[in-house]
Image (spheres, helix red, strand yellow):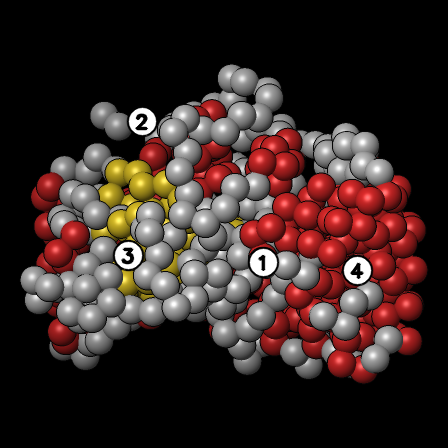
Amino acid sequence: MQSNTPLLLTDEQMRTFITNGCLILKTDFPREFHESLVEQLNTVYTEEGNPGNNLLPRIRELRKVFDHPVVTGALTSVLGANYMMHAHRHGHFNASSVAGGWHKDSYWGYKRMRNHHPQWAMIMYFPQDTPVELGPTGVLPGTQNYESRTFEGNEPEGEVLASGEAGTFALIHYDIWHRSTPNVLGQPRYMLKFEFMRTELPQSPSWDNQESGWRKPEGLQLPIGEHDLMWEETWNWLSGQVGSIANTITSDPQRIAELSAGLSSYEPSAINAAYELAASGQSGVDALLQALHSEDKNVSRLAAYGLSVAGSEAVSGLVAALAAGENAAEASSEEIIANAVFALGELRGFTSEAVPALVNLMQHPSETIRCAVVDALGLMEAGHDQIVACLGDALQDESAQVRFMSSLALSRLGQSAEAAIPQLEIALDDENRYVRAHAAESLRYVGTERAKDTLIKFLLNARWCPTTTAKNAFYP
């Protein structure tokens, strides 16, 4: 009998995920399981169309996939034991002989600052044998931290295809560049896409960790660039260390000037410059703070990534940037503030002094800034009473994205978010499907008796029968 104990990733697999942003793994269900799954998918897609977000309840056997120890082990290793499944899920049907375009997924139609640290992940599951000719998903390894298509105009080398026997799946960093590949066989090809989010910040490794220090995986070959310092910092962050690379490099003024200029260069090189500045002590931090105020939004964004790993020395300058951004040119003011908020959130335990300033920013007219604030508040390790009150109020924000991110932030706070239950109860009737769904998730993570009672009542009232269709309305 199959064990339900998660099969955690090894050190080498985690190193590969950090560098490549993807792993190709496989479950061991019997062939009959996948044959039944595909038969149900064929019936539903033919008779009812794509079930969209109802994919999981409509195809009941699919829930077994997300209880499989290889799947739970992979997600636990990357996102921690209490990861959350997003309410958005989608069954991709590919019968096209033409390759899809390279893209990153949006956040269910919205934008936000993308995390270098693994905060979000996706699983792309293939329920049928998927040879290369059937058009599996293609992933470009190592591109998860590139905002731009650095390979624009060229057909990139090194594409990884999620091909294999039924039960093969790709575990990917949410922000990696990917595409569908040509299905030249003309047979149905399903890819079942599910998104997951971290709800707790790492305090120690959540994979099968045997070695404490970082080293690159064996035989590493990436199509675009290498980022040794960023990878080391991510490994340390996943092990519970924040600001681990701060003050680890001694740089003279000339080197600081070179790195500062490099922030406006080719993106892979600019990322390396930002992280080296973050490791270069106060002089590097000062250069990053100056770059944060750049009118070039890409330079400001890259500076924020550097500041987000620069440790305690970056905090006072980031707090000052919240106010200074208001005095910048109108076109860049929003970017500067939102980038500073992002960096403060990533620094979490170092930034308790920033909580009042962040809370005050919830009065800002910019949706982008308010969304960044609620995201950051959910990462703070102090001031929870003030934070919970603010996030509870944000559940009534005019922006659906702010409301959604508020419920996710509350779920990260667990039982300390109990005071927000009345606002979460109201959010269960929100007009937006994702706000409703994740208000329910937040109640689950709060976990008190009132939270559970409210959640159970909501779920019973909202119960959806997976066997009721137009052809089978009542019986049997």
Other-residue count near label 2 (Cα within 10 Å), few / some / many at <14 / 14–19 / ≥20: few
- Give the residue type at disc 1: Tyr
Could you say which is closer to the camera, residue 290 or residue 340? 290
Regarding residue 106, the answer to whether it shows in the image is yes
Name the residue: 86% across, 70% down.
325
Q: Are marks 1 and 2 in contact (CB under 8 Å)?
A: no
Q: Are marks 3 and 1 in contact (CB under 8 Å)?
A: no
SS at mark 1? loop
Could you say which is closer to the camera, residue 242 or residue 176? 176
Q: Dot 1 corresponds to which residue?
A: 266
Q: Residue furthest top?
A: 210
The image shows residue 425 at horizontal and vertical percentages of: 63, 67
Name the residue: 35% across, 56% down.
156
Q: Which mark is residue 3?
A: 2
Is 329 left, or right, of 91 in this rendering?
Answer: right
Please tell me how many numbered marks the rendered image carries.
4
Q: Dot 4 corresponds to which residue?
A: 291
Earlier sequence position, callout 4 versus callout 1? 1
The image shows residue 252 at horizontal and vertical percentages of: 84, 38
Q: Nearer the viewer, mark 4 or mark 3?
A: 4
Earlier sequence position, callout 4 versus callout 3? 3
Q: Are marks 2 and 4 in contact (CB under 8 Å)?
A: no
Earlier sequence position, callout 2 versus callout 4? 2
SS at mark 2? loop
The image shows residue 96 at horizontal and vertical percentages of: 17, 71
Q: Dot 3 corresponds to which residue?
A: 137
Earlier sequence position, callout 3 versus callout 1? 3
Q: Is residue 450 above or below residue 366?
A: above
Earlier sequence position, callout 1 versus callout 2? 2
Q: Is residue 118 above or below residue 328?
A: above
- Give the residue type at disc 3: Thr
